[in-house]
């Protein structure tokens, strides 16, 4: 089975970081406003995702990305995406 950790960018320029076993379905849920934590941050843009074969690894990556160090890493990694001029 496949597992994903993913990063969305909301209209408020803030990250939403999640974990799922069905990325396509989860993105549809976000887009349709069925996820309460992102409902008012739409439209959302998928800016990064990672594939894992083990759910424990995907959840661990999600937890790291939600940390301060993880946010800093994402900001550096996605500099061109986040800071277009």
Image: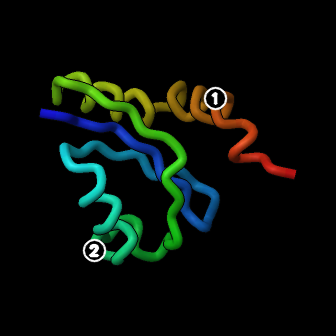
Q: Residue at point 29% right, 56% down?
A: 24
Residue 31 badge: none
Q: Nearer the viewer, residue 61 or 53?
A: 53
Q: Residue at point 34% right, 46% down?
A: 18
Q: Residue at point 58% right, 33% down?
A: 74
The x, y position of residue 41, in whole percent, is 50, 70
Q: Quadrant of residue 3?
A: top left
| 71 lies left or right of 5 | right
Vertical relation: 43 (above or below) 53? below
For the N terminus, the image quarter is top left
Vertical relation: 49 (above or below) 25? above
Distance from label 1 to label 2 (Cα)? 29 Å
| 71 lies left or right of 56 | right
The x, y position of residue 53, in whole percent, is 19, 24
The crowd level at tag 1 (other Cα within 10 Å; few <14, some 14-19, many 20+) is: few
Residue at the spot of label 2: 34
> As drawn, which residue projects farthest toward the right?
85
Q: Are marks 1 and 2 in contact (CB under 8 Å)?
A: no
Q: Quadrant of residue 50?
A: top left
Vertical relation: 29 (above or below) 85? below
Q: Nearer the viewer, residue 2 or 19?
A: 2
Residue at the spot of label 1: 77
- Number of numbered discs: 2
Give SS at disc 1.
helix
The x, y position of residue 82, in whole percent, is 70, 47
Give SS at disc 2.
loop
């Amino acid at each position: 089975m496949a597992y994903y950790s993913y990063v969305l960018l909301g209209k408020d320029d803030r990250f939403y970081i999640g974990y799922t076993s069905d990325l396509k379905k989860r993105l549809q849920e976000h887009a349709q406003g069925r996820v309460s934590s992102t409902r008012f941050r739409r439209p959302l843009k998928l800016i990064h995702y990672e594939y894992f074969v083990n759910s424990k690894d995907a959840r661990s990556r999600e937890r790291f990305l939600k940390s301060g160090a993880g946010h800093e890493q994402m900001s550096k990694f996605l500099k061109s995406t986040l800071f277009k001029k």
